[in-house]
Each structure stands twice: as structure tokens, then as C-alpha cells.
Amino acid sequence: MNAWKVKNVPLITLAALLSGCSLVPQYERPTSPVPSQFANAATKTEQDSTAQKSSTTTLDWQGVLRDQRLQHVVAMALNNNRDLRVALLNIEKARAQYRIEDSALYPSVTAGLTHTASKANGSITRSDALKVGISSWEVDLFGRLDSLSQEAMETYLATQETQRSTRMTLVSEVAVDWLNVWAYQQQLALAQQTYQSQLNTLRLTQEMHRLGAASGVDLASVQSSVFSARGDVALYQTNLEQARNALELVVGTAVPEALLPSDDDIDQAIALAPLTDNLSSDVLLQRPDVLYAEHSLKAANANIGAARAAFFPTISLTATAGRSSEQLSDLFSAGHGTWSFIPSISIPIFNAGELRASLDVAKIEEKVEVAQYEQAIQTAFSEVANAFAVRRRIDERLDAKEGEVAANRKTYQLTDALYRNGADSYLNTLTAQRSYYSTQQELITLKLAELGNRVTLYQVLGGGADAKAESVTQTP
């Protein structure tokens, strides 16, 4: 019988047939610890959304971030952000680690050519040998190597989700920082407008004071408001510079002036992601952070299989075949065939409880991953619910604030007219002006919150995780 055959079945094939026994527990996704639906009510804006035909998680990011300038800034970030670069490199590292673990399932074939020379009793003996063989291949009878390979694969997949989560967060951060620049632009413009108005009032009050039509108290009050407005201008100039710095930091490079926002159609810059009444919480299962937690759970589950397999014997095979001769030139013509077959078995007998402890650790780690998976879902549900809570009342708040601005504008105009005609003191005008100015600033902040809520809804529902810079081709 040929030494490489057993009942006409090749040795490697036989080992492969014996392999495949798995001690990995059957994976079952934990029950979701949150309600099955979100208690949201679709608003008119949501119902009119042009993106209604697409789900949030698959909706292209340019369908939400519609402003062409913003699209180019996001594309710049996708190409230059350092956090995203690190995430991509970690994927390459995890992929390489998986290949290492997976390669252990297959035999390592080596080849070697040796020449031996020795001298005894005045004669020199030479020999040459060529060998091809398998070096210490572990037959995976109980699935230990396969379990480790599964664990490495799930770790690799989890790392991919980290990259997707980084991409999703990056798109959202760029949009929010870009909107912050817009908000500080508006607040600075309002502060400059107010400052100029106060300068005009100061010149009028100085003339009225010279003519005896305005008191020294009125003049001092106007001067105080001028200094206050000037301070606000400096403050918002600083805030705007810091907002631009924050945007360029997350983008990873300088952002050209032409790509910064303006007041033109800012309401159309960000679309509202498609939403429906009683949205199912199953959408959370596609969020990158939740998928990361699930892959980590599967990796821990596979590790239990590896820990269980460690209790069973380990069988290794070493086998070679080749030829030898006294002359290299005769190696393939007059040489002799050689072979060796060395199976070995290692049986755990005594290890002071190490294997049992390793299995206990693996089971505990799996329970930890279950808890972290449930926590990931709960966190995701809370983020979406909070975003819905803001969305349900944001339009009402905007309407109320716009009404307040209109009322304060009218009050300021009336009191200012009375003051300019000498019918009232400047104190009432100053109070009305400050209220009008304050509510205008609050309206800008509230508009920013509404636009930011659109971005947040898209992000927390899993949108933007697969954003690609290549899709932006036109120059704004």
C-alpha cells in the first residue's frame, strides 16, 4: 500500500474530512431591549420631502446635504480627515490578522535541497537530497483553528463598521461646523448692523444734548449701548474665526472662501431625511455602532468554541517526500525515493485548571458583549428619540420666535420714533432695542438648531456611513 494513501483516500483529504467539527455555540441575536417603534409623528415637512422614496440608511448623503458648497467641503473631509485615515488603516490591519488566522487551517508546504559531504577513512562521501513536505500541520478535528478564524473574521468586520461609523460622524460634523460658520456670519452681520445703528443714534443724541433736547443720562445711555454693540462685533468676529478653524480642523485642510455658506437659501441647504409615522426601531440594527457591537459579540461567541476545543487532543502531521543520490546530476535519474510520515498527538492531562478558567473567561466575555450590544441599541434608540423630540416642536418654536421678533421690531420702531421726536426718554428705546436685538440673535440660534436637527436625524438613523468623495465631480 502506498505510504501516502489510506484506502485510496489522500491523507490531506482524509484530514480535511475529519476536520470541521465545531464547538462554537449556535449564535442567536439578543432580543432588542427597546420598543419596536418610535413614537414619532411625521410633520408636513417630512411628508413633502423629495427624498421620501429612499430609506434613511441608504439615502445618498448628497440627497440630504444639498448645498453644492457643502458637498465639496464634505468631499474634502472624506479625502483629508486624519481620523478616517486611521480607521481605514485599522481595517487593513484587521484584514491581515484575519489572513494570518485563516492560513492556519491549511498545510504549509515547503521544499528544500540539501548537499552533505563527509570524510571518513580517507574517503569523501557526498549526498544530495530534495524534499517537499508538510511541516507540522494541525488537523482541526474539533474546530479550534476554525473558531479562531471566525473570531478574526468578526473582528475584521467590526473594524469595518468602525470605519463606517467614523465616516458617518465625519459627514455630520462637517455639516454642523459649516452651519456654525453660517450662524456666526449672521450674528456678526446683525451685531455690525446694530453697532452702526447705535453710532447714528449717538450722533443724533449728541446734537439733541447740545440743543438741550436730550439729558446727560440719555447721552450716557447711548454711549453705553455703542460700546456694548462694539464689544459684540468683536466677540462675533472671534467666534466666526474659531468656527472656521473648527471646520478646517475636521476637514483636514483649508476651506476656500467660496465654499463657505451665505444667507442665500440656507433653508434649502439641508433636506430633511425621509421619516414615517411609527418608524420601526429595527432601522437601528443597521447603524455602524450597533453592527460593530454585534460583530464583537459574534467574535466572543467564536472564542468560546476555541476555548472548548482546547480540552480535546491536538493532532499534528509532518510528512515529506523526495529523492536522494550521491550525485546531484543523478538526483532525478538514478536517485532513490524517500518519504517520511510523522503524526503526533498532544492530549491535555493536567494544567491546574487553566483550560477551565480560559473557557469561563470566554463565556464571561460573551456575556459582556451581549450587555454592550444591548447598550448600543439603547443608546441608538435614545439618540433617535431625542432627535424626534426636537423635531416635533421645532417648527412651533420657530414660528413663536419669529412672531416675537416682529413684535419687538414694532416696539423698537415706535419707541425710537418717540425718542427722536422728544416725546420719550432714551431708556425705553434702549430697552426695546436690546429686546429686539436679543430676539434676533435667538432666532438665528434657533434656525441653526433646526438645521442641525436635520443633520442629526440623518446621522442617528444611520445615514452617511457609506459616503464617498468621488461622487462630487462638479466645481461649484
Image (cartoon, helix red, strand yellow):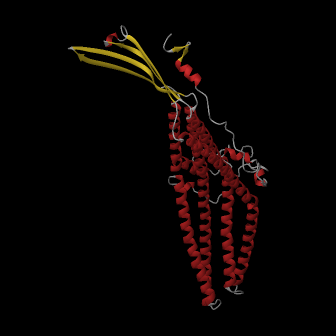
- Quadrant location of residue 13? top right
Residue 337 seen anywhere in this rendered image of the structure: yes
Task: Answer left or right for 414 relative to 321.
Answer: right
- Quadrant location of residue 266? bottom right
Residue 29, placed above or below residue 223 = above
- Quadrant location of residue 211? bottom right
Task: Answer left or right for 143 relative to 393.
Answer: left
* Residue 333 pos. (x, y %): 37, 8
Residue 192, placed above or below residue 365 = below
Q: How many marks?
A: 0
* Residue 34 pos. (x, y %): 73, 51
Q: Residue at x 49, y 11 (%)?
A: 2
Q: Residue furthest top?
A: 334
Q: Residue at x 73, y 61 (%)?
A: 394
Q: Residue at x 61, y 78 (%)?
A: 198
* Residue 62 pos. (x, y %): 64, 47
- In depth, the one of 6 and 197 nearer the eye is 6
Task: Answer left or right for 337 relative to 213.
Answer: left
Task: Answer left or right for 126 relative to 81.
Answer: left
* Residue 244 pos. (x, y %): 54, 60
